[in-house]
Image (cartoon, rainbow, N blue to C red):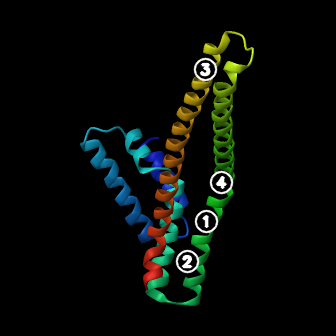
Amino acid sequence: MTRQAFIARLREGLRGLPPQAIADIVADYDTHFADGAAAGRTEAEVAEALGDPARLARELHAESTLTRWKEERSPSSAAAAVFAVLGLGAIDILILLPILMTVGATLFGLIIAVIAVFFAGGVVFAAGPFMDLPGGPAAALLGGIGLMAGAASGGAVLSLASIGIINALVWYGRLHYRLLKPALQS
């Protein structure tokens, strides 16, 4: 994304804020692009590092309304702040909740499958030598060990994936807490 496209999308999302606030925000993000260019980064790299301009605009809009409520303490500014944060949360729920439910259900299913394969490997390892399986007792023992090792490896990969997802959710929660913290402390 180019600098002009990023700034245009940011301006579009900031509609409704006072013109001076929009100018200050745009100048701040223009500075990010200038600093990036001075550091030898392309406009696309800087835009990617800054994130989605529409999302930034929603967060900045919510932050601005929270700041206005903190300064004015009027019912209209309180309502604007509540609706801005709820709007941010509603979009998160509509987009994030189905994704999280799908990822969570998939992880749960894979964990159950890994546990089942591990126990199946144990059964093959323990009972295989006493059954008439193709390849004889040695193949049954090695097959059982292989199933259990594969399940243990799969469990380790699932653990790493779960940790990564939880870390991403914590980061995302902190992002919203950063917006709400000034309003909660006053």
> Marks 2 and 1, how far apart in space?
12 Å
> Which residue is at the far right?
132
Q: Tell me if label 2 and label 3 are in contact, CB under 8 Å.
A: no
Name the element at disc 2: helix
Measured as percent of width and height from the top left, residue 56 is found at 49, 58
Q: Is residue 14 visible?
A: no
Camera-nearest residue between 5 and 163? 163
Looking at the picture, does residue 17 appear above or below residue 135? below
Q: Which residue is drawn at 55% across and 69% down?
A: 16
Q: Label 2 vs label 3: CA separation? A: 65 Å
Q: Can residue 181 be seen in this view?
A: yes
Q: Mark 4: which amino acid? A: Ile
The residue under label 2 is 81
Q: Earlier in the sequence, mark 3 or mark 1?
A: 1
Crowd around label 4: few <14 · some 14–19 · many ≥20 (10 Å): few
- Label 4 to label 2: alpha-carbon separation: 21 Å
Mark 3 or 1, which is nearer the eye?
Answer: 3
Q: Earlier in the sequence, mark 1 or mark 4?
A: 1
Q: Indicate the amino acid at tag 2.
A: Ala
Q: Distance from label 4 to label 3 (Cα)?
A: 48 Å
Task: List the residue tagged with mark 1.
Answer: 89
Crowding at dot 1, Cα within 10 Å, few <14 / some 14-19 / many 20+, comes out as: some
Horizontal and vertical percent position of residue 67: 45, 78
Mark 1 residue element:
helix
The earlier-in-sequence mark between 2 and 3 is 2
User: At 49% across and 48% down in the image, what residue appears?
Assistant: 163
Q: CB atoms at circles 4 and 3 under 8 Å apart?
A: no
- Label 4 belongs to which residue? 95
Q: In the rendered view, would you say 128 is above or below 110? A: above
Q: Residue 141 carries which label?
A: 3
